[in-house]
Amino acid sequence: MIRRILSFVLLAWILGFAWFALLLPQPADISKTDAVVVLTGGPNRIDRGLEILKAGQSRKMLISGVDRDVKPRELSAQYEGSSRYFACCIDLGFQSVDTRSNALETARWAKRNKVRTLRLITHDWHMRRARFELDRALADDIIVTNDAVASQPSLNALFKEYNKYWLRAVASLLGI
């Protein structure tokens, strides 16, 4: 009986991993939202957020998880033609250090800015866990659109992220 239960759990984990790895979230269409949140930690994320602002599809952007030593002027210098957006429309979030604290920082920012619709930008392999944390932190009336930046994650990166996702799901069930 125990062997059957363990076999079932292992099979469920393997099938879940296949779903996780093969059906990564995709980029969203450019539809209007009140705001964009970009989680730092990988290439092309901020570029995607700036693309949304430049297209006039959002009015505000939060870059969450910015290192405390980064200055807005230094960051804007890395993105050609973005200084005007850094002056008016982009907030830098210095409070978060991981995905969970990104979600908490985003929830506080969204409340302060009266955001009702939000576009979440992160890499495809990170989107499910980021969205899980964000859904737990945000008010229920905020509509979130996933906008995954396509990448080529290694099998090792997918394996780690899948396990982090399930560990957070179990921890949240336990109230942690």
Image (spheres, rainbow, N blue to C red):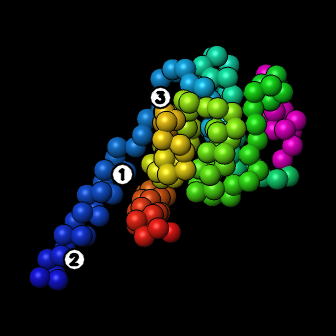
Q: Residue 20 carries which label?
A: 1
Dot 2 or dot 1, earlier in sequence: 2
The residue that mark 3 highlights is 28
Q: Which amino acid does label 1 sit on?
A: Phe
Q: Marks 2 and 1, how far apart in space?
A: 21 Å
**In terms of secondary structure, where does tag 1 sit?**
helix
Coordinates of residue 110 in the picture (x, y in percent): 64, 38
**Numbered-mark total:** 3
Which residues make up the magenta segment?
70-82
Coordinates of residue 131 in the picture (x, y in percent): 49, 46
Residue at far left of view = 1
132 above or below 143? below
Task: Give residue 106's quadrant in the image.
Answer: top right
**In terms of secondary structure, where does tag 3 sit?**
loop
Q: Residue 6 carries which label?
A: 2
Dot 1 or dot 3, earlier in sequence: 1
Q: Marks 3 and 2, how far apart in space?
A: 38 Å
Q: How crowded is mark 2: few (under 14 residues within 10 Å), some or many (20 or more)?
A: few
Q: What residue type is labelled 2?
A: Leu
Q: Marks 1 and 3, how far apart in space?
A: 18 Å
Q: Is residue 104 left or right of residue 126?
A: right
Q: Which mark is residue 32?
A: none
**Residue at screen point 56% across, 25% down:** 33
The answer to whether residue 170 is seen in the rendering is: yes
**Residue at screen point 67% across, 23% down:** 59
**In terms of secondary structure, where does tag 2 sit?**
helix
